[in-house]
Image (cartoon, rainbow, N blue to C red):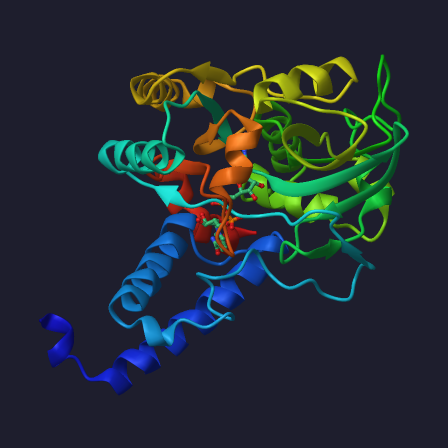
Amino acid sequence: TQTDQVDPTKVADRHAELSAELTEHAQRYYDGDPVITDAAYDELYLELVQIEESFPDLVTDASPTQRVGAQVGSSFAPAEHLQRMYSLDNVFAIDELKAWAERTQRNAGTTLDYLCELKIDGLAVALVYEDGVLTRGATRGDGRVGEDITANVKAVANIPDRLTGDDIPALLEVRGEVFFPVADFTELNEKLAAEGKPTYANPRNTAAGSLRQKDPRETAKRKLRLIVHGIGASRGVRWRSQSEAYDLLRGWGLPVSEHSKVVSDVDGVVDFVEYYGEHRHDVEHEIDGVVVKVDDIAMQAELGSTSRAPRWATAFKYPPEEVNTKLLDIRVNV
Ligand code: NAD
């Protein structure tokens, strides 16, 4: 085979080099300050995956393929998540998406309803509500420990300090994405440009930078918003499906997406992917793909997760757009 002819030392060197590069890029990305495009990052990541497929001995717990996000720095207090936060595996083509659905269905041993959602290009956060009161906000960090940004999340206008309505659970941990709405971002940049000031590269990095300001008053100056797309620990509530959970969360005043849809087979998923491929810019936030989830919560638990991502969900990534490839040029101008 091809791998027999490859010098293993060289492969190990390349593996170490890629791991170090990806770790550094991830750190910068979570700080809101990336220096390469997401597509370029995904390409390096794929190279690492392919090396590890041919040389499984090179896989260690420290590999970027085995862990979530980046380690947290010392700017904020550490916040241990009540339940682990994961990343998502990716597919980049419709046939890969169909293969994922077939595999998942086979592992489940039954037909599945899929919850289709937009993949919001923002910053992942976890919020804890105790008896309906927001007691903590945290970044994802490495999935186990994030940064305590409670004061900053309280500066996001649509994050409720207190849940309202009936049957509020004793404990509720939700996950979501904080983003900078495209219209507000454009307005901000136009204003800065008119004043002759440097503009921001893109909504995602600006959101990440704004949410992790030392002074929450700086966060409040940006029109950041949240959409909830996941549930962590809870006590005093039961849900059969993720879509049912969203209805309850909406009822308690938490912002959930208006664009999610439950479909009963993979063709429905493909329709959703194709629709938003064409209507990417008709949504209030940037999207970099579609997230497909098994809707049934008991089945999610049964399918479980790898060390990095749930087996019950995948992200279909849209091809990168022109504007992303200009990220570096824009940064140089700043
Ligand atoms: P990811 O962004 O590919 O997917 C996981 C995340 O998607 C989740 O943690 C969640 O926060 C988010 N998400 C958005 N909408 C969601 C929804 N509806 N349901 C569930 N989750 C949703 O994974 P990642 O591990 O955060 O980051 C990897 C990606 O980030 C790379 O593929 C790359 O595109 C980008 N990245 C870029 C750089 C860079 O230097 N440019 C560095 C690191 C990562």
Q: Is residue 215 visible?
A: yes
Q: How many marks?
A: 0
* Direction from residue 71 to residue 67 in the image, left or right: left
Q: 212 or 268: which is nearer to us?
A: 268
Q: Residue furthest bottom?
A: 9
**21 vs 289: above or below:** below
The image quarter containing residue 141 is bottom right
Q: Residue 122 placed where, x, y %?
A: 59, 38
Q: 232 or 191: which is nearer to us?
A: 232
Q: Residue 29 placed where, x, y %?
A: 56, 55
* Direction from residue 284 to residue 288 in the image, left or right: left
Q: Is residue 120 visible?
A: no
Q: Quadrant of the N terminus?
A: bottom left
Q: Residue furthest left?
A: 1
The image quarter containing residue 321 is top left
Kindly identify the residue that appears in the image at 46 percent across and 68 percent down: 63
Kindly identify the residue that appears in the image at 88 percent across and 27 percent down: 132
The image quarter containing residue 2 is bottom left
**148 vs 217: above or below:** below
Kindly identify the residue that appears in the image at 43 percent across and 49 percent down: 38
* Direction from residue 238 to residue 153 in the image, left or right: right
Q: Residue 30 placed where, x, y %?
A: 60, 54
**196 vs 140: above or below:** above
**219 vs 284: above or below:** below
* Direction from residue 1 to residue 40 in the image, left or right: right
Q: Residue 318 placed where, x, y %?
A: 35, 34
